[in-house]
Image: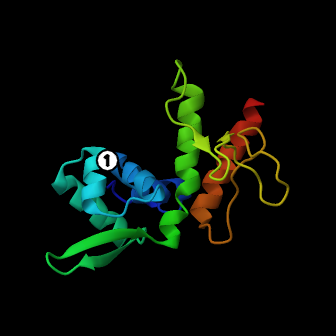
């Protein structure tokens, strides 16, 4: 975990990375989104050390991404079930897969996304919910939200001024 620096506490990217950005966390979530729920399943799938898996599952549960449920009394065993918040990480995982397939797989993708019903490969893109137009670095920018501090508003204004000056 990174220290909570004042300028980062309002940044959605910083908050998300603090919660799910650690290497093992995103891979645990990837596996959970494909149906894994049990400690031994994650351990086998990832080849992760048990102590590291315990720490990551604890963090993800405390962050509200998993709910821990008892599935065996003797011995006591728990499964980790994604919450709605945890399921909402799916587009992030999809975006990472799409990015890696486009830019990090010069010999071709080893894993594709596919439509469940047909098996047809899917190419993920981010679209605006209102217009269904693709959201790209050229078509979108960040603006202050309703709860933005004055400091954040000033930083954004300074960034926009610097960008305009370069244009």
Residue 64: where, in percent of width, then height?
42, 72
> 128 left or right of 75?
right
Q: Is residue 135 above or below residue 51?
A: above
Where's the C terminus, which quadrant?
Answer: top right
Furthest toward the left, the residue is 75
Label 1 crowd (10 A; few <14 / some 14-19 / many >=20): few
Furthest toward the bottom, the residue is 73
Residue in the foreground of this view, choosing between 89 and 7: 89
* Residue 151 quadrant: bottom right
Going 36% across and 49% down the picture, which residue do you hit? 22
Q: Is disc 1 placed on a helix, strand or loop?
A: helix
Residue in the foreground of this view, choosing between 8 and 58: 58
Furthest toward the right, the residue is 131
Residue 63: where, in percent of width, then height?
39, 69
Residue 102: where, in percent of width, then height?
60, 29
Q: Is residue 72 above or below residue 8?
A: below
Q: How many marks?
A: 1
Going 77% across and 45% down the picture, which residue do you hit? 134
Going 68% across and 47% down the picture, which residue do you hit? 118
Going 19% across and 81% down the picture, which residue do you hit? 73
Residue in the foreground of this view, choosing between 94 and 115: 115
Residue 33: where, in percent of width, then height?
48, 57
Q: Which residue is mark 1?
A: 45
> 156 left or right of 4?
right
Where's the N terminus, which quadrant?
Answer: bottom left
* Residue 5 visible to the viewer: no
* Residue 17 visible to the viewer: yes
Image colouring: rainbow
* Residue 66 quadrant: bottom left
Q: Is residue 50 above or below residue 87?
A: above
Residue in the foreground of this view, choosing between 35 and 134: 35
Furthest toward the top, the residue is 107
């Amino acid at each position: 975990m990174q220290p909570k620096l004042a300028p980062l506490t309002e940044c959605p990217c910083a908050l998300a990375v603090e919660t799910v950005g650690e290497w093992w966390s995103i891979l645990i979530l990837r596996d959970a989104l494909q149906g894994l729920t049990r400690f031994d399943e994650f351990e086998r799938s990832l080849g992760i050390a048990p102590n590291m898996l315990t720490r990551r599952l604890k963090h993800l549960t405390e962050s509200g991404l998993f709910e821990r449920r008892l599935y065996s009394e003797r011995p006591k065993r728990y499964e980790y079930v994604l919450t709605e918040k945890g399921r909402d990480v799916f587009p992030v995982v999809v975006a990472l897969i799409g990015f890696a397939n486009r830019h990090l797989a010069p010999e071709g993708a080893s894993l594709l996304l596919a439509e469940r019903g047909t098996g047809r490969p899917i190419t993920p893109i981010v679209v605006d919910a209102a217009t269904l137009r693709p959201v790209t670095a050229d078509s979108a920018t960040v603006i202050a939200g309703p709860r933005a501090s004055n400091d954040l508003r000033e930083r954004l204004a300074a960034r926009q001024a610097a960008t305009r000056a370069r244009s």
